[in-house]
Image (cartoon, rainbow, N blue to C red):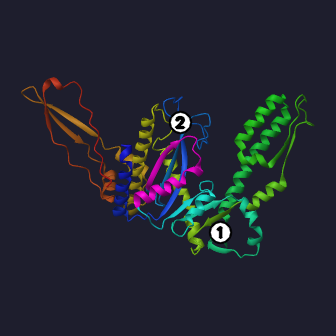
Amino acid sequence: MSEHKQELFVWLKQKWADLFHADFEVLLYDLTSTYFEGEMEQNPKAKRGYSRDQRPDCLQLVIALVVTPDGFPLAYEVMNGNTSDRTTLRGFLEKIEDTYGKAQRVWVMDRGIPSEAILQEMRQPERQTFYLVGTPKGRIHQHEKKWLDLPWQKVRDSVEVKLYQHEGELYVLAKSEGRQAKEVAMRRKRLARLLRKLRVMRKSLPKRDQLLLRIGAAKKEAGRAFGFVKIQIPKAGQAVTRETFSFQVDKAKLKAAQQRDGHYLLRSNLTGEDPAVLWTRYVQLTQIESVFRSLKSELGIRPIYHQLEHRADAHVLIAFLAYCLQVTLKNRLLIYAPGLTPAAVMEKLATIQMVEVWIPMVDGRWLVLPRHTEPEKDVQAMLEHLHMSLPSQPPPRVKASHTLLLPENEPATQPSLW
């Protein structure tokens, strides 16, 4: 099946264009990982690497994905578990151009994916490839003198931007009040939890080795919030006392971080684009995060138990095919029943079952009547809203008497989403 994957996505793209007039000119690109249960010695792709699932103890695969802002996938690749994000973009640029032809597409990515060399290639006039990419917050300080004298422009009720062109790129410093409040609250929550644990340690004064283990566990849980606390740890051979073990919040560092909260620095070679449009496109990256969450939770792409490479790849492919059906249903719901979710619809459809009625005949044979159950009123109303109908009841068939051991299990027929 994998050799037909490219043809499949071309067919799907055309279907989505016909059904929903889908636009494929803005592409979101990101990577995730999914881990294995077991040693996976027969799968050369199973490697240890940066785990998005917080499972560094497990071997994993890396999955790169290209989707539209509406969630329609154009391509994906299964890569070695230790693949670096920065090494993947060039291949996908070529893959999309080879598969769908050259066009003035806009690639939206988070920081850490494109290298400076790739961005320079994308800026070449003959390539006609546009990008919008997040930039580390440290660059805000590099351009601080240029930002200070520029006015803020409001692009939304709670979002303001400052614009600056530099070496053929448009830099957008965006400030989101909502995101700022969220980041401050998240840091305070983690910092408060960390300080409570440190106070307990300072009260109980465990042995030095035990203290180091507890601090290590607290550091892992606190994440970046750990960097805002200065901790004095007793040296080797010293006893743990209130004098040798102490901690305090780095208020200056915390204040500087809070001033950067809610700020994003974006880069783009769309120098003439409206900043409101750029901001809207960048926040659409949450769509691809939603796709990854759906794949990992509802569609069961993690963990992987298959030992062989081709079976693990098939596991990922089946999950993506399931997602293609899900996103098709989601966009159909937006048209006909915007109040419903795909999960709610599938739960309703699960009440429709396939049954068989076996009727004895006078000659010893059996008349078999396969039938799907009639939908309840609410299910029927939902199907009518979606402009969907159940297939005709299957035709009856005759079985010889000696074949009656157990009724055959035939899969329930589902309404077509296409």
- Labels 2, 1: front one: 2
> Which one is nearer the viewer's eye here, 355 or 217?
217
State the image coordinates of residue 18 (x, y, percent, origin top left): 33, 63
- Residue type of the residue flagged with mark 1: Val
The answer to whether residue 258 is visible is yes
- Left or right? Give the position of 395 relative to 246: left
* Crowd around label 2: few <14 · some 14–19 · many ≥20 (10 Å): many
The answer to whether residue 158 is visible is no
Q: Residue furthest left?
A: 363
Q: Quadrant of the C terminus?
A: bottom left
Does the stretch in magenta take in 81? Answer: yes
Q: Bounds of the magenta span?
A: 73-100
- Residue type of the residue flagged with mark 2: Ala
Q: How many marks do you count on the picture?
A: 2
- The CA span between labels 2 and 1 is 39 Å
Indicate which disc, 2 or 1, sits on the residue closer to the N terminus: 2
Residue at x 43% of width, y 65% of height: 23
Q: Report helix, strand or loop for mark 2.
A: loop
> Which one is nearer the viewer's eye here, 416 or 224?
224
- Left or right? Give the position of 106 relative to 350: right
Residue at x 56% of width, y 35% of height: 59
Residue at x 31% of width, y 48% of height: 376
- Left or right? Give the position of 90 relative to 190: left
To which residue does mark 1 refer?
Answer: 172
